[in-house]
Image (tube, rainbow, N blue to C red):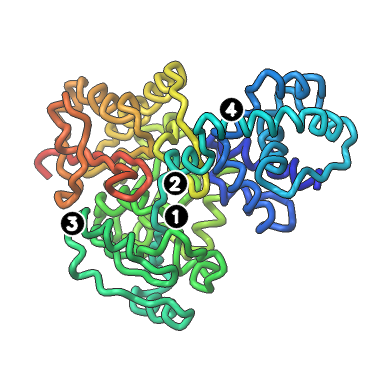
Amino acid sequence: MDNLYASVAKVLELTVSKKSSLRTAVYNHKFKNKKQLLRLSCETLKYRAYLTKILECQDVMRHIIKCDKLNNQKELCLILLYELVFGKGVSLGDKQIKRAVLGAKKDILTEHQALMDDGIDPESIAKTESIVLPRYGRVNTLKAGMDEVISALQEEGYEFLDNSDVKNRTKFKKAVDNLQKYQFFVDRHVPEVLVFSPYVDLHNSLLFLESKLILQDKASCLSAFVLKPDVGSVCVDACAAPGNKTSHLAALLENQGEIWAYDKDKSRLGTLEERIGACGATIVIPTNSDFLRVPLEDLETVSYAIVDPPCSGSGMVRRGEFLAEEYNEKRIKGLSNLQSMLLKHALKMPNLRRLVYSTCSIHELENEGVIQEVLNEDWVKDTYELIDPLPSWKTRGKDGYDFSNLCIRADPKVDLTNGFFVVLFQRKNI
């Protein structure tokens, strides 16, 4: 069990720091029993806010700080608290940790009861901090058509529903709420996206295993979808890894033309190469390079670009994860500066026609703030205009900007996607 707890602690560390999604962290981990690892990770995250209240109790903490192996190991402590409070008890081989936990057990359970007596219910806390989103799957048209995927899903026992009546957000939410576990329908905005129940697991589907169905949040699909590149053109994905947007772009290009995919992180680029290989995206040219250092003369044939730069990830509503975003102003400002530099560099490409800027952040400084910073440059205003990426999308940018109505924001609560931001630049007079 010690190995399980250590593995869950690593998963939680990656998840809470937003270095990875929960499922990616679980499936990339070497721990063999993935279901056991996923279950304990999800449950600990579900009650994380409540367990933190117990951990911060002075009587509990005095036992923890005496143990070198638990001191400053918050995630491991929360796992052990979960096992004591909600699980079947702690099973440990490490004598030092076991002594500390058993020493704290009485105080842990006393604090748990005190919180309950004060009306602080763990289930209520978990529920109020969670947003349940549907699952989305993008049909990889490089490997299969929509009809083929629908038929294959039906053969696997899924029921295909008619979505002709789903014409607005209210009806979309109702349709999602009414979805049974093995039902699905076609999304109303992005026609290659299928909408599934939040509670279905598609990882064992043959379609997923053969990369005919890509598990990708709907909002993430907007970047390539609204760019609408001409088939056969040359495109840039400036910060391409892990590669879902890149493979979507390749599908929209029908594997004709070229996609120059840059990423300065060699490990992440390796992930991209694996994904585009599995997806059959043969026109992608991966390059381990910082896009800011790519000379403009090397980009003269580029017509379309996606700039989806490193961001805070504050819009990510991770399945099974109940996390409150902590606003780090210094970090967000640093990211905003990098995002502005990347966007300006991309807009300098001499023959660029259209460019999408997108983030999975909810922070104004990374979104409208970056666009305003870039539009303050006269050469940008003289060369480009913002156009509405998707007129049927209702959630728009923050008030206070001249271009707010030309920005797309995805709000998890009303749009049922991860938090996302999209802007579309188009060269004037093309």
Residue 193 location (% of width, % of height)? 34, 62
Q: What element carries label 3?
A: loop
Q: Check the picture and name the quadrant holding the C terminus.
A: top left
Residue 284 position, x and y percent, is 44, 55
- Crowding at dot 4, Cα within 10 Å, few <14 / some 14-19 / many 20+, comes out as few
**Tags 2 and 1 in contact by the CB under 8 Å rule?**
yes
Q: State the residue in front, 154 or 322.
A: 322
**Where residue 321 sits in the image (x, y, percent)?**
52, 43
Residue beneath label 3, please?
168
Hey, which residue is sitting farthest front in the picture?
117
Q: What residue type is labelled 1?
A: Val
Query: Does 336 appear above or below 393?
Result: above
Which residue is disc 1 drawn over? 284
Mark 2 — residue? Answer: 261
Marks 2 and 1, how far apart at CA: 7 Å
Q: Give the CA separation, mark 2 to mark 3.
A: 35 Å
At numbered mark 1, what does the secondary structure look like: helix, strand or loop? strand
What type is the residue that disc 4 sits on?
Lys
Query: Residue tagged by mark 4?
Result: 53
